[in-house]
Image (cartoon, rainbow, N blue to C red):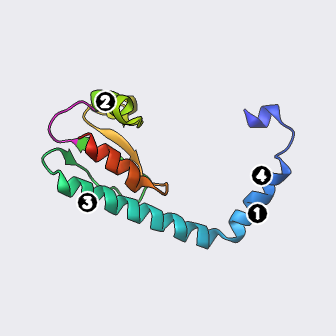
Amino acid sequence: LKDYTTICSSAPSEQLGVTALEHGSRILARNRRILQQNLGLFTDLVRRHPEVLRHNPGQGGSIIFPSFRDGRSGAEFSRKLREKANLLMLSGDLFDMPEHFFRVGLGRAGLGETLELFEENL
C-alpha cells in the first residue's frame, strides 16, 4: 500500500534505517538479551505451574505458543485477563491452532510485570 500511495520514503525513516544498519550488531545483541531473558522468565513460570502450563521454547523466534495442560480454553482465559487485569492475550484459535494454545511475544522489555499479572490470574 505504501508503494502505491507515496512517492518516496520519509527522510527521517531513511536516516533511522541507516543508523540501525550502522549499529546492527549492538541492536541484535540487545534484542537477543531481551528474548533470552523473557524466555527464561516464561520457562520459570511454566516450572512453577507444571500442572497448568506447558511450552516448547521453539528455535529462536520472538513468539511462542504455549498451551494450557489442564484443558482450559485460551479464549475464555483471555476474556478473564482482559476483564480482571486489563491484559490482552490471544488464544490459539485465532492462529488456526487448538483453543488451549495461546500466543506470547517475547520481544519487549518489561515482560516480567505482564507475566506477574498472568500468574496472579491462573
Q: Amino acid at mark 2?
A: Lys
Contact check, label 3 and label 1, Cβ < 8 Å: no
Horizontal side, residue 109 vs residue 70: left or right: right
Horizontal side, residue 6 vs residue 77: left or right: right
Q: Nearer the viewer, residue 59 or 55?
A: 55
Whole-number angstrom distance, CA of label 3 to CA of label 1: 38 Å
- Residue 47 x, y percent position in the rendering: 19, 57
> What is the total number of numbered labels drawn onto the structure image?
4
Q: Nearer the viewer, residue 26 or 9?
A: 26
Contact check, label 3 and label 4, Cβ < 8 Å: no
Q: Magenta segment: does it hold 77?
A: no
Whole-number angstrom distance, CA of label 2 to CA of label 1: 43 Å
Q: Earlier in the sequence, mark 2 or mark 4?
A: 4
Whole-number angstrom distance, CA of label 4 to CA of label 1: 9 Å
- Residue 92 x, y percent position in the rendering: 33, 34
Decide if residue 65 is in sight here: no
- Near mark 2 (Cα within 10 A), the count class, few <14, some 14-19 or many ≥20, is some
Q: Which residue is mark 4?
A: 13
Q: Which residue is mark 1?
A: 18
Q: Amino acid at mark 1?
A: Val
Task: Using the image, tell me which numbered label, if any, was put on residue 44.
Answer: 3
Badge 1 marks a residue whose secondary structure is helix
Whole-number angstrom distance, CA of label 3 to CA of label 2: 22 Å
Is residue 121 positioned above or below 83 on the image?
below
From the image, which quarter does the C terminus lie in? Answer: top left
